[in-house]
Amino acid sequence: MKKIGIILMIIGLGLTIFTAFTFFTREKVVDLGSVEITRSKPHHLNWSPLVGIALLGIGGGLLWQSSRK
């Protein structure tokens, strides 16, 4: 339980600091025989910093619970 608590706290801290993630996919625009034109299309993934704070709290609770025993 102690390891899981520490891992959740690290993930929660990362989600609190970094609240967005952008990744790109390639999209085919034109395909004329041997000529292909593609473009990179960005996709944004955003989340609330409250998700990271909640994970920090859960991880801290697990860490505290495991140290009490």
Image (tube, grey):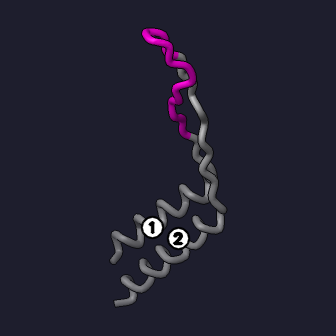
Q: In which quarter of the image is residue 50?
A: bottom right
Q: Where is residue 29 in the image (x, y as percent from the top left)?
A: 57, 24
Front in this rendered view, residue 64 or 51? 51
Tell whether label 2 touches label 1 (CB within 8 Å).
Answer: yes
Q: How crowded is mark 2: few (under 14 residues within 10 Å), some or many (20 or more)?
A: many
What are the residue bounds of the magenta stretch? 23-36
Residue 8 badge: 1
Q: What residue type is labelled 1?
A: Leu
* Residue at x 42%, y 77% (from the top left corner): 63
* Residue sitting farthest toward the bottom: 69
Residue ID for mark 2: 55
Drawn side of residue 26 relative to residue 1, left or right: right
Q: What residue type is labelled 2?
A: Leu
Q: What element carries label 1?
A: helix
Q: What element carries label 2?
A: helix
- Quadrant of the drawing holding the N terminus: bottom left
The image shows residue 35, relative to residue 39, as above or below, that is: above
* Residue sitting farthest toward the front: 33
The image shows residue 7, relative to residue 61, as above or below, that is: above
* Residue at x 58%, y 65% (from the top left corner): 52
Number of labels in the image equals 2
Q: How crowded is mark 1: few (under 14 residues within 10 Å), some or many (20 or more)?
A: many
Front in this rendered view, residue 28 or 64? 28
Front in this rendered view, residue 25 or 7? 25
